[in-house]
Every structure is written in structure tokens, then in C-alpha cells.
């Protein structure tokens, strides 16, 4: 009986509910995938910058500016993924 | 909805009712924040300039060191000495973005104005128009287009590939990424703070899980501090990118 009731519940889902469920799944997946590349990229970038600063402390200011620029460009991909997340989940 | 934890819909987080008017001319909390940010930036520099003394004290000290920061940390690192003529634009850009971001953690507002797309999109479009105008003025329109679309030192056959990429990345992606970077960072921070705020409120109401509340509240406090840092960092990154684009338009060979 309970199995039947569950099946009936699944069948009676409205298109809006199905769309919302698919949207939520897609949103989580989209942001998770979008965060992989920039995560690796920013980690590598900052690691290399720290190494450069440690080897040549007098160039630290220049390295830091370039590092922030690189972070800004790399991070943009993750942020676009976040915007896709918002669009899929809420719009 | 888990354990009575109900997250508010996104409309409740970013859409604010109008104080005056409706539809396209409505004046709401976001507009008020932008007005305050504009006025605060102007008043800050006017007050610092009014009581100007040889030995800076108080407001003048803050203003001088922040202008020095824009000069040394942004312009000298990216454009060089001849970029100092853009100091007024970059400094006011920095302070406007910083103050409108800081409303994220100011009690009573708790909404970064830049978490709505309109403000960042406008700032990015102004910056986009500005660096194109600077490029046209310094190199001449045709030479600027040639330098930015056909970068020197590339084999002629590769221009089939390079020119469309350069066109898209310079004239289409730049304003888009500039706006989305600021907008998405502030929206993400806002949602993060709301999530932990809602979690704390729910744990307070719920009896048995009260023991978890200190951790959740600690996270909320720590994240508030983190968001202050993000607000500063995003203003800095927007300014430094604007400076890089202006510098690239001035000197094509960099």
C-alpha cells in the first residue's frame, strides 16, 4: 500500500515540481563543477606567488599586485558558475 | 526544509520594497545606499580638503594615506607615472564601491548595494567606455583598433584565430566579467551571511540543538569579518582592473 501511495505521489508531481527538482540538482552540479578548475588554479597561483615572494622579498609588492590580478581573472569562472547556480535554482 | 530550517526565497533576500514611487523610478534601500555612498565619498574628500594643513591630522591623514594607497598600490604598479592623471576616477571608483559594499555588515542595512546587478553593470560600462575613449585619444581610433585587434608579433596566418578572440575578450568579456565579478562576490557573501543568520535563528528556537548554536554563531561572526575583507578586496580588484585596462589602452606594447 505504501509503495502504491509513493508511486501515486511520484505520478502526481506537477511539471513545476519536476522542473524545480531538476533545477536544484542541476544547480548543485553546476556550481560544484565550476568550482573545481578555479580552485586548482587559485591554489597554484597563490602557491607560486608565495614562493616568488619568499625567494625575492624585495619584489613582493609587484608579485602581490600581479597575484591579485591573476586571482581576479581565475575567480571569474567560479563566479559565473555561481551566477548559473542562482539562475537555475531561483529563476 | 530540514529540522524546521526554512530558507527564505531569494526574492526576500535581494528585492526591497520602494520607499517612494514604483516600477522604474522606485527609490528603495539599494538606491538609498548608493546615494549615501556617493555623498560619503564626496564629503570625505571635501572635509579632508577643507581643513588642509602641512602636517596632516585626522580626516586629512586618512584621505592622504588612502590616496597614497591608490597611487602606489594601484596606479604605479599597473600603468606607471603617466597614469597619475586617472587618480581622481580610480580613487572615487574605489571609495564608492568600498562604501556601498560595506553596507553588507552595517546593522539596519545588511545588504551590499552591489549585490544587485544594476550598480556593477553601470560601473563596468562607464569603465569600458572610459578605456575605449582613452585608447582612441592616445593612439587614434584606427591605431587603437589595430593594436588591440591585431597584436604585433603574431604570425599573419594566426590572425584568423587571434583577432576574434581579442575582439571578444577586449570589447565583450571585459565589461561583463568586471560587472559579474563584483556582483557575484557580493551576492555570494550576502547569501552566506543570511544562511548562517537563518541557521542561528532556527537553532535558537529549536530546543535540543541549542548546543550547536555557539559554533554556528561563531561562524556567523567570523564570516562577518571575512565579508569586510571581501568588500575591501573587491573594491581593490575592480579598481586595479580598471587601471590595467586604462593602462593597456594608453600603452599598447605592454
Image (cartoon, grey):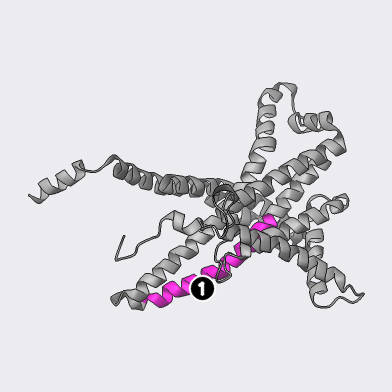
Residue B83 at x, y percent in the picture: 84, 50
Magenta residues? B212-237
Check residue B216 for magenta coloring.
yes
Q: Is residue A89 left or right of residue B26?
A: left
Q: Chain of mark 1?
A: B
The residue that appears at 87% across and 74% down in the rendered structure is B51
Check residue B77 for magenta coloring.
no
Residue A89 at x, y percent in the picture: 41, 48
Give the residue pinned by disc 1: B221
Residue B125 at x, y percent in the picture: 69, 44
The residue that appears at 86% across and 35% down in the rendered structure is B139
**In terms of secondary structure, what is the magenta stretch mainly?**
helix
The residue that appears at 29% across and 40% down in the rendered structure is A15
Residue that extends furthest to the front in the rendered view of this protein? B21
**Residue B254 in view, yes or no:** no
| Disc 1 element | helix
Residue B204 at x, y percent in the picture: 36, 76
Amino acid at each position: 500500500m505504501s509503495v502504491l501511495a509513493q508511486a501515486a505521489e511520484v505520478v502526481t508531481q506537477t511539471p513545476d515540481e519536476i522542473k524545480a527538482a531538476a533545477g536544484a540538482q542541476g544547480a548543485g552540479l553546476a556550481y560544484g563543477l565550476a568550482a573545481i578548475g578555479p580552485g586548482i588554479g587559485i591554489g597554484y597561483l597563490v602557491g607560486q606567488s608565495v614562493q616568488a615572494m619568499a625567494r625575492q622579498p624585495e619584489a613582493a609588492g609587484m608579485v602581490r599586485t600581479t597575484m591579485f590580478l591573476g586571482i581576479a581573472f581565475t575567480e571569474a569562472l567560479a563566479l559565473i558558475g555561481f551566477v548559473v547556480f542562482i539562475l537555475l535554482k531561483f529563476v | 526544509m530540514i529540522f524546521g530550517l526554512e530558507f527564505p526565497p531569494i526574492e526576500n533576500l535581494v528585492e526591497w520594497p520602494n520607499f517612494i514611487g514604483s516600477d522604474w523610478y522606485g527609490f528603495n534601500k539599494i538606491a538609498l545606499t548608493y546615494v549615501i555612498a556617493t555623498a560619503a565619498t564626496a564629503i570625505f574628500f571635501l572635509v579632508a580638503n577643507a581643513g588642509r594643513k602641512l602636517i596632516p591630522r585626522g580626516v586629512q591623514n586618512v584621505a592622504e594615506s588612502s590616496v597614497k594607497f591608490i597611487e602606489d598600490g594601484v596606479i604605479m604598479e599597473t600603468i606607471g607615472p603617466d597614469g597619475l592623471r586617472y587618480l581622481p576616477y580610480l580613487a572615487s571608483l574605489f571609495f564608492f564601491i568600498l562604501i556601498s559594499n560595506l553596507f553588507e555588515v552595517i546593522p539596519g542595512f545588511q545588504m551590499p548595494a552591489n549585490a544587485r546587478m544594476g550598480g556593477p553593470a553601470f560601473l563596468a560600462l562607464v569603465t569600458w567606455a572610459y578605456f575605449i575613449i582613452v585608447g582612441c585619444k592616445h593612439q587614434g581610433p584606427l591605431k587603437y583598433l589595430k593594436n588591440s585587434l591585431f597584436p604585433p608579433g603574431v604570425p599573419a596566418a594566426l590572425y584568423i584565430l587571434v583577432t576574434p578572440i581579442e575582439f571578444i575578450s577586449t570589447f565583450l568579456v571585459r565589461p561583463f566579467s568586471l560587472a559579474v565579478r563584483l556582483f557575484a562576490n557580493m551576492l555570494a557573501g550576502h547569501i552566506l551571511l543570511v544562511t548562517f543568520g537563518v541557521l542561528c535563528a532556527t537553532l535558537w528556537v529549536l530546543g535540543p540543538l541549542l548546543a550547536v548554536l555557539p559554533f554556528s554563531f561563531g561562524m556567523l561572526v567570523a564570516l562577518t569579518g571575512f565579508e569586510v575583507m571581501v568588500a575591501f578586496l573587491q573594491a581593490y580588484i575592480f579598481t586595479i582592473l580598471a587601471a590595467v585596462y586604462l593602462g593597456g589602452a594608453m600603452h599598447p606594447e605592454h
